[in-house]
Image (tube, grey):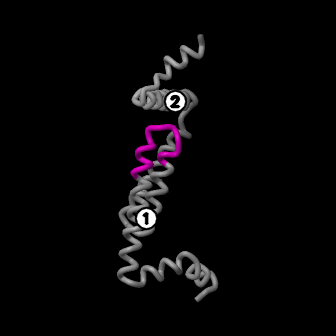
Amino acid sequence: MSDEVQERRSGIGGWLDGVRSTRTGALTLKIVIGVIGAVMVVGGLIMVPFPGPGWLVVFAGLAVLATEFHWAHRVLEFGKRTLRAWTEWYKRQGWTVRIIVLLVTVAAAAAIVYLGMKTVGIDLIVLAQQFVQ
């Protein structure tokens, strides 16, 4: 075995290989990875409408799931391809389209924050009016 393969197997990869070497360990690892990844994906999806790292958490959760589940790897690759295609499309657009996309994004984020705060009883428009006066 080459030194590189031995180093990889002696780290976390080696530990995971050891866990997977028994049927109980493999099942336990699948369950643990499945729960952690699912919590991350669901938490990220809840965060998506709000400003912050929602999509980043979704992709991180899929990456965790992809370590044990082939379907998650396929979904993660689809997501990466879609993001890459969107980014490439956006780069090809002129300044007018870029500014429109930016304005729509900011307006959607503002509406989501406003409605989110309104549901917990805080009206940001009233607060802004009080602040200005």
Between 26 and 81, the one nearer to me in the picture: 26
Q: Residue at x 47, y 61 (%)?
A: 63
Can you tell which mark lies on residue 106?
2
Can you tell which mark lies on residue 56?
none
Q: Is 44 in the magenta?
A: yes
Q: Is 91 in the magenta?
A: no
Q: Residues within 10 Å of mark 2 (few under 14, many from 20)?
A: few
Q: Is residue 26 above or below residue 37?
A: below
**Residue type at tag 1:** Ala
Q: Residues within 10 Å of mark 1 (few under 14, many from 20)?
A: many
Whether residue 91 sits left or right of residue 38 in the image: it is: right
Provide the residue span drawn in magenta: 42-55
**Residue type at tag 2:** Val
> Whole-percent x and y of residue 122?
46, 25
> Whole-percent x and y of residue 71?
36, 63
Q: Earlier in the sequence, mark 1 or mark 2?
A: 1
Q: CA distance from mark 1 to mark 2?
A: 32 Å
Q: Residue at x 44, y 48 (%)?
A: 44
Residue that extends furthest to the top in the rendered view of this protein:
133
Residue that extends furthest to the right in the rendered view of this protein:
3
Query: Which residue is identified by label 1?
Result: 66
